[in-house]
Amino acid sequence: MLAGAGLLTLVLAGVSLFVGVGEVSLGALLGSGERETRLLLASRLPRTLALLLAGSSLAIAGLVMQMVVRNRFVEPSTAGTTEAASLGFLLVTLLAPGWPIMAKMAVSALCALAGTLLFLRILRAVPLRDAMLVPLVGIMLGGVIGAVTTFLAYRFNLLPSLLAWTTGDFSGVLRGRYELLWLGLGATVLAFLAADRFTLAAMGENVATSLGLPYESVVALGLGLVSVIAAVTLVSVGSIPFLGLVVPNLVSLMLGDNMRVSVPWVAVLGALFVLACDILGRLVRYPYEIPIGVVVGVIGSAVFLWLILRDRRAHG
């Protein structure tokens, strides 16, 4: 089944290369179509690679966060992580606009980590009797951070830039403007290598420590990976909500909670889901394009609601 999902992902990746306003045909590429070849290499291929990298890494980020927080309804966009990354990117843009993009990404990642740690600190201080209260706390925290970010952007006339950062959109991806996403692939590989540790951490601090796991170090590693993925995705293509929630939960329904088994599935299905949503967004109002953040947000929120109702029925 995994091989079939991988094959379908490759098929959609091939389709993605030929869908768009600028016409690219296989015949022209095999002939002397220099314009089509330049378009393919400069835009379509980088966009497809960015879709694969962002989809797989964000899905893995959601899986890691769910293991660390021990709640299946959290991911970067429901824990304040993405909003904190946006705030960090805005601050460094205001205070050090001449810094290279890597430095801005590092500041954004540090702010994402700080926002996630604040989320975990609030969870420890608030008695939570219902699993659904955990993402609710995260969404409220994200709302507060987002309000601060919007105020600063309004104050310094950066609202259009903020909208561009916070709306997931691959239409502007070109060669030389997506390569940071390869860091997300590195984080995905690290998550796979540490999968057994994250699985033990999901059993709770007492159980994990009794089995010899350095619990705090594993949690720190997980939060670091999530923060880096959230930052590089935000800087490169914007925010894509609910992706890290939907894909890991669907995989968990099929395969259970063993992360070493889940990681390949989550990575492949995350890339497949983003590819499908991006192609749909390009075709629904062709030749115009709907940003992928909107498409994934609509589909993801519907699946999120279904997961909530399913969980309620299972426990009620």
Image (cartoon, rainbow, N blue to C red):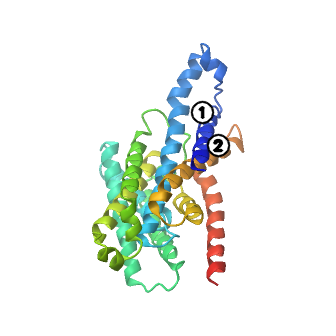
CA–CA distance between discs 1 and 2? 10 Å
**Residue 281 visible in the shown view:** yes
Q: Which quadrant of the rendered structure holds the C terminus?
A: bottom right
Image quarter for residue 182? top left
Q: Identify residue type, mark 2.
A: Ile
Between 58 and 85, the one nearer to me in the picture: 58
- Residue drawn at (43%, 67%) of the image: 67
Q: Badge 1, how many Cα within 10 Å: few under 14, some, many 20+?
A: many
Q: Is residue 123 above or below residue 91?
A: below
Q: Identify residue type, mark 1.
A: Leu
> Which secondary structure, mark 2?
helix
- Residue drawn at (71%, 39%) of the image: 286
Residue 89 place in picture, x, y as percent: 38, 53
> Which secondary structure, mark 1?
helix
Relative to 228, is 239 on the left or the right?
right
Give the residue at mark 1.
17
Residue 151 place in picture, x, y as percent: 44, 63
**Residue 154 visible in the shown view:** no
Give the residue at mark 2.
279
Residue 79 place in picture, x, y as percent: 46, 68
Q: Are marks 1 and 2 in contact (CB under 8 Å)?
A: no
- Residue drawn at (58%, 39%) of the image: 10
Q: Badge 2, how many Cα within 10 Å: few under 14, some, many 20+?
A: many
Between 17 and 215, the one nearer to me in the picture: 215
Residue at the top extreme?
Answer: 32
- Residue drawn at (49%, 63%) of the image: 77
Q: Is residue 43 above or below residue 257?
A: above
